[in-house]
Amino acid sequence: MKRERQSPTGAADIAALQRQAKCKSDPGVIRPVVDASRCEGKGDCVMVCPYDVFVVGQLSDAAFRSMPLMTKLKLWAHGRRTAFATNADACRACGLCVTVCPEDAIRLAPFGGGASSSPVP
Ligand code: SF4
């Protein structure tokens, strides 16, 4: 069953979330991993991350072609828009992006831990 999440709707909501966040790591230790088969590019992660780790954009043709079929179908339905963790080195593992993502598409993983990667533009 899909979890229901309430997106932050305004600057006050986002500021309140960021005040409550506790950084659990130095930069360069933990990174967010975006599951492109779930992400719909809504951008809640962009709004909430205190360290500007994410951008939302459209996958390049080459990146799109490299995706598995089911992921391609999902991406196609959303105009190939997805989140990119372009500044993953800055992540401090506060977990806000994981908490607010309405599609449950983000998890945190150690750098160099062998976990799959976020999509690249
Ligand atoms: S856990 Fe998510 S919101 Fe927090 S710093 Fe890392 S990428 Fe940004």
Image (spheres, rainbow, N blue to C red):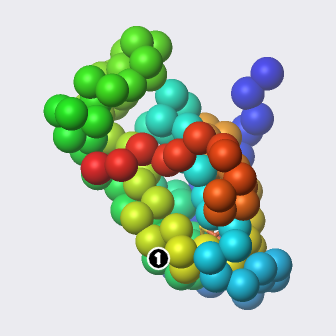
For the point 53% across and 61% down, the residue is 45
Which picture quadrant has residue 23?
bottom right
Quadrant position of the N terminus in the picture: top right
Q: Is the residue marked by circle 1 packed among few (<14), some (14-19), or many (20+) residues within 10 Å?
A: some
Name of the residue lying farthest toward the top: 69
Q: Which residue is the site of mark 1?
A: 52
For the point 52% across and 68% down, the residue is 88
Q: Is residue 78 left or right of residue 96?
A: left
Label 1 SS: loop
Residue 40 in sight in this render: yes
Which picture quadrant has residue 20?
bottom right
Residue 38 at what x, y percent from top left?
54, 32
Q: Quadrant of ligand 1?
A: bottom right
Q: Amino acid at mark 1?
A: Asp
Residue 14 at what x, y percent from top left?
60, 75
Q: Is residue 78 left or right of residue 94?
A: left
